[in-house]
Amino acid sequence: MSGSDKRFPLPLSSVVEKPPAVANGRKQPLARIATPQTATQNAVQNLQRAPQQAQAIRVMPAAAVPDAAPRPAAMVSQAVRAAMVARLAKQGIKDGKVLAAMEAVPRHMFIEPGLSSQAYIDASLPIGHHQTISQPYIVARMIEVLRAGPNGAAMDKVLEIGTGCGYQAAVLSLVAKDVFSIERIKGLHELAKANLRPLRIANIRLQYGDGMLGLPQVAPFDGIILAAAGLEVPKALLEQLSIGGRLVAPVGDRRQVLHLVERVSKFEWTNTQLEDCHFVPLRPGVV
Ligand code: SAH
């Protein structure tokens, strides 16, 4: 456990940015921002089409929180995120709270600067150590499935296996009371810590270790998300689900399917196969 949360007491929501400056009752002319990035251009075109609920939260890097008017770069990143959320809604994500969380978390801050122009396209991207940040759609989809259970809105404790760069943990932090996330690669555990630090999220605890073992000392969890695919769901994780809790995991090798496991009682779990997906492999041990 990093224990670093104590040093960063400000919640992500405390770096909420003011909406774009209003001139004569109209939004500033975003379309005039000159940029060669296609994603940005699309975002500007799509901005007006983004769902209302998704525009409610505006977050930017803590280091860049404005004291006066928002700067063009921040406006561009907001616009591109709004467009990403509009796309997610078109792809079938319906949970307003998940869409708002996806719009709030600055995905570009979890990606190396050389790739940040691609931060809001719907693709997984390399984060080093042969691992990837998951594509936005699957991040949103897994969290939506997690929240659709009987305990739904009341997700107290959530466990993520595979912190990677920390992006999904940040999104989860906006829909769950406490988020625990385990990473088996030391370098990525450190990367996630560094990525999350400026966001000052108080309710994430990062753990370096083998996520296949879960966190028995913290269990039971209302929700467990695996960001890496195994041939089956580790038994230890099933045992660490609360009754009524939900686990979402990619299962398979070449062909992977997203599975939803619900714990019905002390000795009973149900398993539903949802859709095809593609994740990096779940591996035992630490490196
Ligand atoms: N959650 C990330 C996705 C990271 S990719 C995101 O927000 O985009 C999946 C991660 O799972 C990799 O970093 C990989 O190292 C990690 N992983 C694989 N097997 C694991 C295990 N047994 N325990 C913990 N992490 C594991």
Image (cartoon, rainbow, N blue to C red):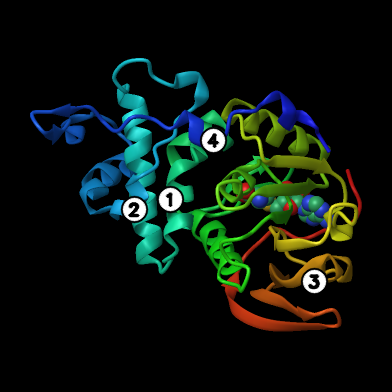
Which residue bears the numbered disc 2? Answer: 53
Q: Quadrant of the N terminus?
A: top right
Q: x, y (%) of residue 37? A: 33, 37
Residue 159 lies left or right of residue 26; in this view the side is: right
Q: Is residue 21 above or below residue 174?
A: above
Q: Earlier in the sequence, mark 4 or mark 2?
A: 4
The residue at the far top in this view is 67
Dot 1 or dot 4: first in sequence order is: 4
**In this figure, which residue is indicated by the disc labeled 1?**
100
The part of the image, by quadrant, that contains residue 160 is bottom right
Q: Which residue is mark 4?
A: 12
First in sequence, mark 2 or 1: give its number: 2
Q: Amino acid at mark 4?
A: Leu
Asked if the beta carbon under badge 4 is closer than 8 A to the nearest atom of ligand 1, the reply is no
Any atom of ligand 1 within 8 Å of the CB at mark 1? no
The mark that comes first in sequence, 3 or 2, is 2
Q: Which residue is mark 3?
A: 233
Position of 93 with respect to 148 (left or right) is left
Helix or strand or loop: what does disc 2 sit on? helix
**What is the secondary structure assignment of the residue under circle 1?**
helix
Could you tell me if residue 256 is visible in this image? no
Please, what secondary structure does the residue beneath circle 4 have?
Answer: helix
**Amino acid at pointer 2:** Gln
Q: Nearer the viewer, mark 3 or mark 1?
A: 1
> Residue type at mark 3?
Val
Disc 3 within 8 angstroms of ligand 1 (CB) = no
